[in-house]
């Protein structure tokens, strides 16, 4: 089922074209990654769908309704970038106000606030004011407001930007837990996180759609191994790999991260041999995975 | 459970909402939240205390003393002659002199207070991004009119507080003054609220355009001077456009100063029409403004 679609969606800021006649159709299901370089139009697209801004041309429908329609209240939620709660009022009071506006009764609103704060492990912050919290905590509160009322579609703009690993993990776990009931569309530059969470990827550049497909189908997974090592002599590792039967090519991507092309037909257990090699040499690895990272798939 | 208790205790009252009017429900919820914001934030409480202090000074040094002079003058002395000269002779016709003085100062000072108090209807929430959270749950017109109604409720509270403080002064002068005070007080309350309608609507409009309360106030002043200048210019060159005299908020104040009690309602159409025009303009802008 299509959860949102847009045709010819265009947004101009003065003479700057942020979105250029975008045609896109996204179905409900597992989280969708929205990626692209800065200025690609990701935030503009999410803002248009959320009803924060109006398109210059084209149209969009979300759950069969126009963006900003009252029928979407409670069904569509968002985590806008750089949006903050009122610093003068407690978190719980503001979230309860939002829940009431979504149509919940007084009692149901209190339950919804309690539940959403529990979900992001922020129940203790209910009586605090936003300025008393760290950046990561405020982001989790913003996730809590997004989850209230169990929306069908949630639009997240840079949910993990500037967060420390524990907060990133909490947010990732929350999204993963709610992915059955809610379709998440996540805009982020953190491609590792997106790869862990998302099934599909939408790649925008210069306001236009470049790719929209399954992450798994971006490139053949067979015959490529990504290895990330801790404190290993890169030359020694690359030499050892070249001597490993089946190796076709090896390249150093960044410090400690290697991509190895191998003959998967003749050497189907190449990954096992690689781990045996690492073990035999006593080299510590962070990660060995089949295929390339999302970043390598998209930008190589 | 702790959270439930805290939030339940924080709910001071509940509006009886009209069944089957879901759109209006959110307007009331937003308006009610404005009252909560006033009564539960330091900034709101500071405004109440500041208003109360200014008002008590005004009550003691001006209303109390001026009403004595007005009562002793009896309508035929020097004070009456001066008021007559100023075109405010009807102030001596009020059965309760304290309310006559309150009426005068209310008409002069409350619009200024209103501009200051209602400047930030949506401005800082927009620049902070809080409006984005709201617009996911309410339509823009609900937010715009909810905030407007909320500010009117806040003003009503302030006027009620100030007008009630005149009662002890009245009773101190005349122990039997309660019936006259009760008869005139609602008329003053209603008419002052009507006077403040266009000011609040003007601030709702400029708040849509501004990024902060200070900027909204600045825009209001610029708009005010521009409209005053242009309408004056047009009336000067085209005498047939004399109706433009009524474009400015408070243009009916001289007429109100010549009215007693409910008589002032005969000029209510002027601020109501001004408010409607300003609200339609503000709503139109709100619908189109990027958040």
Image (cartoon, rainbow, N blue to C red):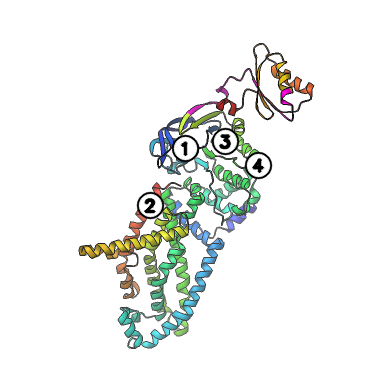
Residue B183 seen from this side:
no
Q: Position of residue A223 (x, y in %)?
A: 63, 17
Q: What number of labels is visible?
A: 4
Mark 3 Cα within 10 Å, few/some/many (few <14, many 20+)?
some
* Residue wearing tag 4: A164
What chain is tagged by disc 2?
Answer: B
Residues drawn in magenta: A210-235
* Residue wearing tag 1: A45
* Residue wearing tag 3: A189
What kind of element bears circle 2?
A: helix
Q: Is residue A228 magenta?
A: yes
Q: In terms of sequence position, does the residue under pointer 3 or pointer 1 come before the other?
A: 1
Please tell me the numbered disc located at residue B192: none
Residue B53 seen from this side:
yes
Q: In terms of sequence position, does the residue under pointer 4 or pointer 1 come before the other?
A: 1
Q: Are marks 4 and 3 on the same chain?
A: yes
Q: CA distance from mark 2 to mark 4?
A: 42 Å
Cβ–Cβ below 8 Å for labels 4 and 1? no
Q: Are marks 4 and 1 on the same chain?
A: yes
Q: CA distance from mark 3 to mark 1?
A: 15 Å
* Residue wearing tag 2: B283
What chain is tagged by disc 1?
Answer: A
Q: Is residue A28 left or right of residue A237?
A: left
Q: Is residue A157 magenta?
A: no
Q: Position of residue B196 (x, y in %)?
A: 39, 65
Of tags 2 and 4, which is closer to the observer?
4
């Amino acid at each position: 089922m299509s959860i949102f679609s847009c045709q010819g969606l265009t947004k101009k800021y003065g003479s700057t074209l942020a979105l250029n006649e975008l045609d896109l159709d996204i179905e409900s299901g597992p989280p969708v990654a929205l990626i692209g370089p800065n200025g690609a139009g990701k935030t503009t697209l999410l803002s248009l769908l959320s009803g924060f801004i109006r398109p210059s041309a084209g149209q969009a429908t979300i759950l069969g309704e126009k963006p900003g329609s009252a029928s979407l209240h409670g069904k569509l939620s968002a985590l806008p970038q750089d949006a903050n709660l009122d610093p003068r009022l407690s978190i719980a009071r503001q979230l309860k106000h939002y829940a009431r506006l979504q149509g919940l009764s007084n009692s149901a609103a209190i339950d919804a606030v309690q539940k959403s704060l529990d979900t992001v492990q922020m129940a203790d912050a209910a009586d605090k004011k936003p300025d008393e919290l760290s950046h990561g905590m405020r982001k989790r509160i913003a996730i809590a407001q997004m989850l209230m009322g169990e929306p069908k579609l949630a639009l997240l703009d840079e949910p993990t930007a500037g967060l420390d690993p524990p907060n990133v993990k909490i947010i990732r776990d929350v999204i993963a837990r709610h992915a059955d009931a809610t379709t998440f569309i996540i805009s982020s530059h953190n491609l590792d996180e997106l790869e862990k969470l998302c099934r599909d990827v939408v790649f925008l550049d210069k306001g236009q759609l470049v790719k929209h497909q399954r992450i798994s189908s971006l490139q053949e997974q067979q015959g490529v191994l990504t290895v990330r090592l801790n404190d290993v002599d890169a030359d020694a590792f690359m030499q050892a790999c070249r001597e490993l039967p089946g190796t076709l090519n090896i390249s150093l991507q960044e410090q400690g991260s290697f991509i190895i092309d191998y003959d998967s037909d003749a050497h189907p257990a190449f990954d096992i041999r690689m781990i045996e090699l690492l073990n035999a040499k006593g080299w510590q690895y962070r990660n060995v995975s089949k295929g390339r990272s999302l970043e390598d798939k998209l930008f190589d | 459970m702790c959270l439930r208790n805290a939030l339940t205790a924080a709910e001071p009252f509940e509006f009886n909402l009209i069944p089957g009017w879901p759109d209006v429900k959110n307007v009331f919820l937003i308006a009610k939240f404005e009252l909560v914001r006033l009564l539960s934030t330091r900034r709101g409480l500071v405004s109440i205390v500041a208003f109360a202090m200014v008002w008590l000074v005004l009550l003691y040094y001006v209303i109390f003393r001026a009403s004595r002079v007005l009562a002793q003058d009896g309508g035929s002395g020097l004070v009456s002659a001066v008021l007559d000269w100023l075109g405010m002779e009807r102030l001596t016709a009020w059965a309760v002199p304290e309310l006559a003085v309150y009426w005068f100062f209310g008409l002069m000072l409350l619009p200024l207070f209103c501009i200051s108090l209602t400047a930030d209807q949506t401005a800082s929430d927009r620049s902070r991004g809080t409006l984005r959270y709201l617009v996911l749950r309410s339509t823009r017109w609900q937010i715009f009119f909810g905030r407007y109604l909320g500010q009117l409720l806040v003003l009503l509270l302030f006027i009620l507080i100030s007008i009630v403080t005149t009662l002890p002064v009245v009773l101190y002068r005349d122990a039997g003054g309660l019936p006259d005070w009760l008869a005139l007080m609602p008329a003053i309350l209603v008419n002052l609220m009507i006077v403040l309608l266009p000011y609040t609507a003007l601030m709702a409009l400029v708040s849509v355009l501004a990024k902060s309360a200070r900027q909204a106030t600045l825009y209001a002043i610029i708009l005010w001077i521009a409209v005053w200048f242009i309408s004056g210019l047009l009336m000067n060159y085209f005498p047939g456009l004399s109706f433009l005299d009524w474009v400015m908020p408070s243009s009916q104040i001289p007429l109100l100063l010549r009215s007693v009690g409910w008589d002032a309602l005969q000029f209510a159409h002027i601020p109501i029409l001004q408010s409607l025009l300003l609200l339609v303009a503000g709503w139109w802008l709100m619908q189109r403004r990027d958040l």
